Amino acid sequence: MTVLTFETLRFAEAQDKVRVIFMKIYEFSINKSELEKIGKFSIQGNSITFDCSEFKAERKFNLILERGFQNLTNIVTKKPTMYIHRNSRIPLIGNIAFGVLDRDTTVIEVRPISGCNIRCVYCSVNDDARVREFVVEADYLVEEFKKLIDLKKQNNIEAHIASQGEPTLYADLPRLVKGLRAIPQVGDISIDTNGTLLNEKFIDELISAGLNRFNLSLNAMSREKADEVAGTVYNFERIKKMAEYISTKCKLIIAPVWVPGLNDADMEELVKFTKSLKNEKFTPKIGIQKFLPYRHGRNCAEEMSWEDFFAKINEWKQKYGEEVFVGMSDYNFKEAKALSKPFKKDQIIPAEIIGQGRLPKEKIAVANDRVISIFTDKTSGPVKVKVKRTKHNIFHGEIAR
C-alpha cells in the first residue's frame, strides 16, 4: 500500500470521478477509471492510497495530476485557470496580471492571483471581460522577488501584495507573507483587500507571518450603499468591525474609491470613521481614491475633475486634520534602480506562445525570461513578435508581419 499526501490538494468523490480541490478555490476532476489503472485506491482528505508500489503510484499519479492541471478551474469565478510554478517555464516578470511588478521604485508589487469574489461597479479590471485566471506558487514568487531586490541593491523595499481581483482568495497567503518577511531587504509588507474574507484569526495569522499594513477598500458607510458599490451583498457591519480590529494591531489605510453620483455622501463619513479609530503606535489613515475610467473597466460614472477632487480633500483636511489623511511620508516610496529590459520598443523577437491570456484573443508568450502579451488567433508555438510596449518591464507585442 502506498499513501500519497499533499499539502495543497484535497480529494472528494463525485460519482464516477474524483474531484481534486487545489488551494481551496480551484478544481479539476479525474475519472475513477484512470486511477483504477494504477491500482485499487481510496481517498481521504488530502491523501490518496493505492495498493501498488510507491514508485508506480507516484510516477503514474503525477502524470494524471499534470494532465488535470491543464483543466484547472476557479471555483469562485468559474473560469479556466493557469497554475504558474517553478517548473512551468513561465517567467514572473512581464505581465500585469501576475508575478512581480517593478515600476522603478522601492515599492514592488506581488501578484499571486487573479479573480475576485465581488463585482465592484467601479472596478478598473472588470473580471466579467476576462476569460482566464492565474495563480502562482508562493515559493516561486518569493524566489523571483528576492532576485529582483538583490539586483536593486537597496534596503527597506516594500512588498505590496495586490491583484487583478482579491488577494485574500489566495490560500497560500500566509506562506507568501512569511517568505517575503524572511528577505532582509524587505521593510513594509502591505496588502490591498476588499475585506470580505477577513476574520480576526486570519488577520492575526497574516500579521504573525509579517504583514504590517492593510489597505482596506471600504467604500460606503451603510449596508445598502456598500452593497450597491460592491455589486453584490457586502457585509458592511462585519467588515467595519474588521477595520476596527486591524487598527489595534498594525497599520491601516481605509482606501475608498469616490464614485461621483454614487457614494459622494459617504466620503466625509468615512473620514469621520477613520478619525475615530485609535492606536497609540500607528495612526489609522484614509486614502480616498478618485474614480478613473479604464479601457476594460466597469466605467459606471463620469470622471470628476482633479481640481474638484483635491478641493474637497483639502476642505476635509482643514476640518478633520491632515494627520488622518495618507501622505507620501506614510510610504517608503522612492525612485530605485530600474530593472534592465531585454527588448526595445519596435524590436522584432522570437517568442513562444504558451497559453491564453486574461482577455479574449490575448495570448501569453515567453522570450528572454520575460512574458509578453500578444493578441492573435494562434494558440501555441513559436512566433515572431514586434514589441510595442516595454514600460516598467510590462511587455505587449503584436505578430510581426
Image (cartoon, rainbow, N blue to C red):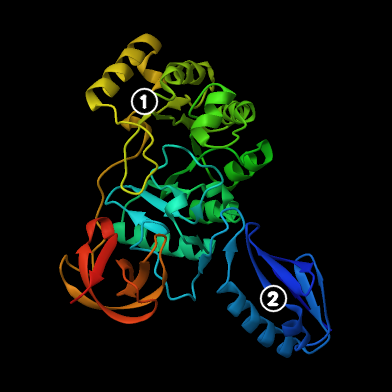
Left or right: 54, with 327 as reference point:
right
Identify the residue under disc 1: 260
Image quadrant holding the N terminus, namely: bottom right
Quarter occupied by residue 271: top left
Residue 51 seen: yes
In the displayed structure, 33 sits above or below 330; it is below
Q: Residue at x 54, y 20 (%)?
A: 277
Q: Nearer the viewer, residue 14 or 171?
A: 14
Mark 1 nearby-residue class (10 Å; few <14, some 14–19, many ≥20): some
Pointer 1 or 2: first along the chain: 2
Residue 63 is left or right of residue 291, and the answer is: right
Q: Nearer the viewer, residue 17 or 256?
A: 17
Dot 1 amino acid type: Pro
For residue 163, say whether it is visible: no
Amino acid under disc 2 = Ile
Q: Quadrant of residue 312?
A: top left
